[in-house]
Image: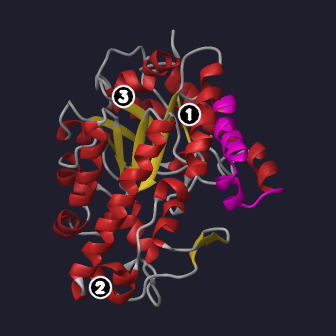
Amino acid sequence: MTDLAKASSSLFLRSIRGESCERPPVWIMRQAGRYLAEYNAVKAKHSFLEICRTPELAVEVSLQPIRFLDVDAAIIFSDILIPATALGIQVDFAPGPVVLNPIRSAADIQALKVEDVTQKTKFVAQAISSLRTELDKLPGAPKALVGFAGAPWTMASYLIEQKPFKHFERTQILAREHPQALHLLLDQLTTITEEYLLSQVEAGADAVQLFDTWAGLLSLEDYQQFALPYTQRIFATMKRRGVPTLLYINGCSSLLPAMIQSGASVLSIDWRVSLSEACERIPIEIGIQGNLDPTALYGTSEEVRTQTKQMLTAAQGRARYIANLGHGILQTTPRENALTFVKTVQDGWP
């Protein structure tokens, strides 16, 4: 079997295609990170940004949850703000993201110059290529490789100066005061994101996930105006290349009607949405991913198993279903509970 055919036969990709699967595929958002002692050992010697920019380190931490959890998909270790450098934005992490030269005005947006994002982020493509090689060497069931990026609205929310606000209100204020300037920024971010994701696919990513984490702060009407068109454009580009796509929005319950129109192959939903309701509202040709509350992994092992089985029962019979959390795994999560979650899904439908 060729490497391409092996990846294509992964449970993750089979599920997205709607093929009959013996069980749901499972992986965990933020599965490489601080809840793992192996990651903390690497982090003790290297900064977060150094890990992201060094392919060998990025590959190592991306493989750590594969070795421990044996999940069905790996996701490249990186950060959604990495491609912001193609707009001349300087980013650091201390430990969370810090934008050193944030956008403060419409004039700042007008002054931005779009550079070649594939050159600015070539270390990500190199890491994906190496990770693809390492995944194909693993025994057992083939693993899918997921690439990712931040959606334009969420990227803009990080890049725009937010002081004195705490919940990205400044981005929405800019939308009121200077809508044309904000649309220009969103257009530029869309162009960068398209090229960035295509470079990941060319390097070996089997599918890509778009994180629009902060779009859940928008009303449905504002989402349809300032976020959805750009997400649709990105997914249309991916679809023309035959690339499966996933869309995640935190706090997405009011946005489900628009998410359905996004063009995503799979909608990744948070735990505030009833999975049973999501299965009723989302057309069967669109996959569903999620949606266990990350704090559920702090219960006893039996409680983790029970809640995981309840989630699977809610999705029972859904052909295109991927088990996951409703947001990234929390950094103090007991690692054995993460393993219990994965193993419970791997035991099959309840």
Q: Judge whether 92 appears above or below 235 on screen.
A: below
The amino acid marked with disc number 2 is Ile
Give neighbour class at mark 2: few <14, some 14-19, many 20+ (Cα, 10 Å). few
The residue identified by callout 3 is 313
Choose the circle earlier in sequence order: 3 or 1: 3
The amino acid marked with disc number 1 is Phe
Nearest the viewer among 243 and 26 is 243
Determine the secondary structure under disc 1.
helix
Choose the circle earlier in sequence order: 1 or 2: 2
The residue identified by callout 2 is 173
Nearest to viewer (mark 2 / mark 3) = 2
- Tell me how far mark 3 sits from mark 1, CA to CA: 14 Å
- Tell me how far mark 2 sits from mark 3, CA to CA: 42 Å
84 in the magenta segment: no
Mark 2 in CB contact with mark 3 (< 8 angstroms): no
Q: Judge whether 26 appears above or below 148 on screen.
A: above
Magenta stretch, main secondary structure, is: helix
Choose the circle earlier in sequence order: 2 or 3: 2
Residue 344 in the image, given as x and y percentages of width and height: 54, 26
Nearest to viewer (mark 1 / mark 2) = 2
Residue 194 in the image, given as x and y percentages of width and height: 36, 52
Q: Judge whether 166 appears above or below 97 on screen.
A: below
**Left or right of 215, for residue 33:** right
Quarter of image, res 172:
bottom left
Give neighbour class at mark 1: few <14, some 14-19, many 20+ (Cα, 10 Å). many
Look at 67% across and 61% down and name the residue there.
49
Look at 64% across and 40% down and name the residue there.
62
Determine the secondary structure under disc 2.
helix
The residue identified by callout 1 is 341
Nearest the viewer among 193 and 277 is 193
What span is colored magenta in the figure?
A: 44-68
